[in-house]
Image: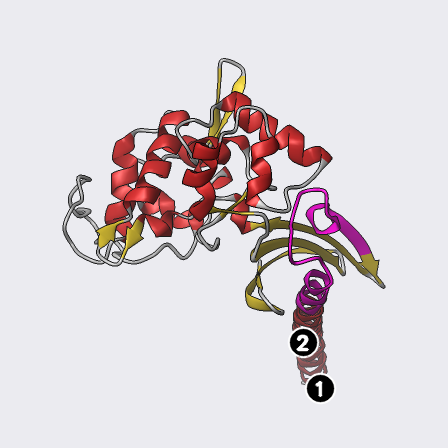
Amino acid sequence: MILIVVFLLISAFASVVVNFSEDKFVFDSYVSNEIQTEKIIFVSSSISQALEEFLDQDDKTVDYLGEFWAQPLPFNLDDVAVTVEIADQERYLNPNFLVDGKRINQKYMEIFERLFNILEINDQILFNIIDWIDPDDKSNGGEEEYPNYLAKNSKLDTLEELYLIKGVSMKIFNGTVVNGVFRPGLKAILSPYSNGKVNINTASKWVLMALDRDIDESIANSIIAYRQKKPFKRIDDLINVDGMSSDILYRIKPFTTVKSENFLANVEIKIGGREYKLVVLLKRKNKTKTIWKKIY
């Protein structure tokens, strides 16, 4: 009988030890994760603040791809490795400007029609984007409401929303290779975060060509070649580019700028053997402010 009692006590004690070890492991893991979470939150806040100060020190009168902010920025903070890539959003076209109140903005419509023609994207998708954005439930030449869900009837908040719009496939979003030549997708030319004006110092040739019917690939390439040697400090400086005319300059002036206001920072963070991605949207006017940040 005594042996049975002793055996039961040993078994019970062993069970307690095992359970305690398991509980301790869970507790330690929980504490470690909490510390890691607090650390990444602290690091992300520090990086966001540093980006604000960094952009505040930059010359706000002109922005171009040769500036320090436009280069990848790797650095280490103790046991934290960080890589920052910043893209001004005024290098892109903003589809939200296609709709002005309840009306189609015809000037922007012309720019987007040229863009879709250049990239050989079906115009129907353009009308579908307008239907997604405009505030009413009526079609503007596009398709009717979606069978499984309603159109947003509001501005795009993220570019990934385009995947919800009829006709936007992975190839149209990401781009394709045609006859050995890469043709960019919508993600390389559009942004819902720009102020509606295109920075001629940072825009791609595709966006430059869309600005006016008389800007062909040759003129767009000439603009890029010119700004690589000397960034444009005024829109009027475009007249120095081969092929440009005062008529083109007059037509594109309302839609162009030489400086940027919105910046999207993609930050890779390695900490404690783990990797995180931080995305920060910053707006710079008199002073740079963080609009939002997300950690993945």
Residue, disc 1:
2
Left or right: where does residue 72 sit relative to residue 78? left
Q: How is the image coloured?
A: secondary structure
Say which residue appears at 60% left-offset and 39% top-offset: 237
* Residue 145 percent location from the top left of the image: 17, 48
* Residue 192 percent location from the top left of the image: 43, 52
Above-or-below relation of 115 to 52? above
Closer-to-camera residue (256/40): 256
Please check the rendered image and state whether residue 73 is part of the magenta-colored stretch, yes or no: yes
* Residue 153 percent location from the top left of the image: 25, 56
Say which residue appears at 67% left-offset and 42% top-offset: 65
Left or right: where does residue 1 sit relative to residue 218? right
Above-or-below relation of 58 to 244? below
Closer-to-camera residue (20/177): 177
Q: Of the numbered discs in the image, which one, if any, rests on residue 209?
A: none
Above-or-below relation of 89 to 223? below
Label 1 amino acid?
Answer: Ile
Residue furthest toward the top? 179
* Residue 275 percent location from the top left of the image: 68, 54
Residue, disc 2:
27
Q: Are marks 2 and 1 in contact (CB under 8 Å)?
A: no
Say which residue appears at 58% left-offset and 53% top-offset: 260
